[in-house]
Image (tube, rainbow, N blue to C red):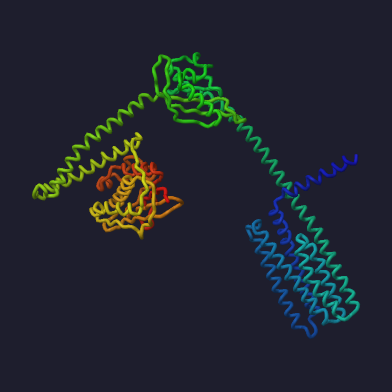
């Protein structure tokens, strides 16, 4: 019986404690501040009235000037408190500034208490007995009256009452009258009694505010919870309809899909297939369902490798894309297929099945092989006669064959420049073809990058002079070593410097910088050109990418240079990028791993 009663009594206490903890301390503080400021007009009026009465009663005597001074302090305090009250009323951010507002009110209470403490300390010894009794009564009224006004924050009340009573207590104790000295001993008890009452009232107010906010928050939470539950029920119903619709769409998609779609269980057995899968392998759905997929799709030695990959796929539970295998059809013919594997994982993080998608890429690979062979053969066949043509034109233009007329020289110069552009295009196409086919070989060595940059500037100054642009380094290039292919780094620099020279205005300077950043060496080529259009930035490193076709054609270029630079740098462990240059223009930069 006793334990049951104790548990029953503890239940409301625990609920109350949890409600107290759930209340927002900021809102509780804001409520306390609001209560204090709501009492401020009463404090202002009552203090002013009592001050007028006290000034009238104490006006006679040789301390008239001090009474006038004290009255001025009261008027100043009244005006300040009134301004503080109106400032609070007009404050639109009371919740956020509650702490600051409470501090201002505490200063106000402290000032009020000090004003009356001054009155008690100065006027009590200098007046007759009746006026002393009046003043003592007035001070006790102010102390007791401050309890309901400041009790919401007992520390403020304690400071207010202390400023009134402590000076008065000192005067009583040192007055020289035994009765007053005995009264002085009771004043601290009176002070502590009132502070204790204020403290208890503060606790009551605080508990009330917390419970009010906690119950309000609890009501809001219950309302919001009911709304969420109702919304979730509607969403669940809508989700059920969508799942059913998605299931029908998925089944229709798999059935009509032009690529082969299988569903395997975790053990690798075929659960279902679509018509495209039947056409790909030549088996019917009934013949494939229930069989291990690795058995009829990857016969021979390949079956073991695929089975091992399948076990790893089930273990990792991650999608796999782009697997290429040679598959055998029912009639024995071989096809090359590209496979994508997607696991279906349940709530327990176990694979319940997997969706396997495959497409025959045999003809696609053959077409790519023929295209590469054609491109390579054609480029080589074009480059040989073109080199001879350019060489012949250079001999004519240099005057080795004798003086030629100006009009003819202009035509042969145009032919030489366009022949060189065509040769550059062919070389770029060959580079791209080698990179994509994996036939490009890099000869990596340890290089002094600063010296290599100086060499690239010297090699490209003649080209920059054609556009009346100067190439220069910014400061001394530090001796930094990188591991890279010398020829390919020069190719990257030539491309960046030629682009910067072509698109910079006449008389401009293309600047080259070098700095170390987190184990990498960054080389920057800064031009003064028109900048990169916003619409072009996402494809600037793509093949045949050119921003302004008419302008680019006037300047020359294949649109392959930056794409080749990007791939070459990635093969050397670096990367390339660009950014806007302060004051106009663009900075193209690349980074290579530092060595040593």
Q: Position of residue 204 (x, y in %)?
A: 80, 55
* Up/down of 162 relative to 582, above or below: below
In which image quadrant can residue 339 be found? top left
In which image quadrant can residue 153 be found? bottom right
Q: Position of residue 183 (x, y in %)?
A: 88, 74
Q: Is residue 302 visible?
A: yes
Quadrant of the rendering where the N terminus is positioned? top right
Could you tell whether 157 is left or right of 535 in the image?
right
Residue in the image at 68% along x and 71% along y: 79
- Compare residues 78 and 544 and report the one nearer the observer: 544
- Compare residues 342 and 121 and report the one nearer the observer: 342
Q: Is residue 586 visible?
A: no
- Compare residues 307 and 277 and report the one nearer the observer: 307
- Compare residues 133 and 473 and report the one nearer the observer: 473
Could you tell whether 267 is left or right of 121 in the image?
left
Number of numbered discs overlaid on the protein picture: 0
Residue in the image at 90% along x and 41% along y: 2
Residue in the image at 27% along x and 44% along y: 557
Q: Position of residue 87 (x, y in %)?
A: 65, 64
Could you tell whether 260 is left or right of 528 in the image?
right
Q: Position of residue 300 (x, y in %)?
A: 45, 19
């Amino acid at each position: 019986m006793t334990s049951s009663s104790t548990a029953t009594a503890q239940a409301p206490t625990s609920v109350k404690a949890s409600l107290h903890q759930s209340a927002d301390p900021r809102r509780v503080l804001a409520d306390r501040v609001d209560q204090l400021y709501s009492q401020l007009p009463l404090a202002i009026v009552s203090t002013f009235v009592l001050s007028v009465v006290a000034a009238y009663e104490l006006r006679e005597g040789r301390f008239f000037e001090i009474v006038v001074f004290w009255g001025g302090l009261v008027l100043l305090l009244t005006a300040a408190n009134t301004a503080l009250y109106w400032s609070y009323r007009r404050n639109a951010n009371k919740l956020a500034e509650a702490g600051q507002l409470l501090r201002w009110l505490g200063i106000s209470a402290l000032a009020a208490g000090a004003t009356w403490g001054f009155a008690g300390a100065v006027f009590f010894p200098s007046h007759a007995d009746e006026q002393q009794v009046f003043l003592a009564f007035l001070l006790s009224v102010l102390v007791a009256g401050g309890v309901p006004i400041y009790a919401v924050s007992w520390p403020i009340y304690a400071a207010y009452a202390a400023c009134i009573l402590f000076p008065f207590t000192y005067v009583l104790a040192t007055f020289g009258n035994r009765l007053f000295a005995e009264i002085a001993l009771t004043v601290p008890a009176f002070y502590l009694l009132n502070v204790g009452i204020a403290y208890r009232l503060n606790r009551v107010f605080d508990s009330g505010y917390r419970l009010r906010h906690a119950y309000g928050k609890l009501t809001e939470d219950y309302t919001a919870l009911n709304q969420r539950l109702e919304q979730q029920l509607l969403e669940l119903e809508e989700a059920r309809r969508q799942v059913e619709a998605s299931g029908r769409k998925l089944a229709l998609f798999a059935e009509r899909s032009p690529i082969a779609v299988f569903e395997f269980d975790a053990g690798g057995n075929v659960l279902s297939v679509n018509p495209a899968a039947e056409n790909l392998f030549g088996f019917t759905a009934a013949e494939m369902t229930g069989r291990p997929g690795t058995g009829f799709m990857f016969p021979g030695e390949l079956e073991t490798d695929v089975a091992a990959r399948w076990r790893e796929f089930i273990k990792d539970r991650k999608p796999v894309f782009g697997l290429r295998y040679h598959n055998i059809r029912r009639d024995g013919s071989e096809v090359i297929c590209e496979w994508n594997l997607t696991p279906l994982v349940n709530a327990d993080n176990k694979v319940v099945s997997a969706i396997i998608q495959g497409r025959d890429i045999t003809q696609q690979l053959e077409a790519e092989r023929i295209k590469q062979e054609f491109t390579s053969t054609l480029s080589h066949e074009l480059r040989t006669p073109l080199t001879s043509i350019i060489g012949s034109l250079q001999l004519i233009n240099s005057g080795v064959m004798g003086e030629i007329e100006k009009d003819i020289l202009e035509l042969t110069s145009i032919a030489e420049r366009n022949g060189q552009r065509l040769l550059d295009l062919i070389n770029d196409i060959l580079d791209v073809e080698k990179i994509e086919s994996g036939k490009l070989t890099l000869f990596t060595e340890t290089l002094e990058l600063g010296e290599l940059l100086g060499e690239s500037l010297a090699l490209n100054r003649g080209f920059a002079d054609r556009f009346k642009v100067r190439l220069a380094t910014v400061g001394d290039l530090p001796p930094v070593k990188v591991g890279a292919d010398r020829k390919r780094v020069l190719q990257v620099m030539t491309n960046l410097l030629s682009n910067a020279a072509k698109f910079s205005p006449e008389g401009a300077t293309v600047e080259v910088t070098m700095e170390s950043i987190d184990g990498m060496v960054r080389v920057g080529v800064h031009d003064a050109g028109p900048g990169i259009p916003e619409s072009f930035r996402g494809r600037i490193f793509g093949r045949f990418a050119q921003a302004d076709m008419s302008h680019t054609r006037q300047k020359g270029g294949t649109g392959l240079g930056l794409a080749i630079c990007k791939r070459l740098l990635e093969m050397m462990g670096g990367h390339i990028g660009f950014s806007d240059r302060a004051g106009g223009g663009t900075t193209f930069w690349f980074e290579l791993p530092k060595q040593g």
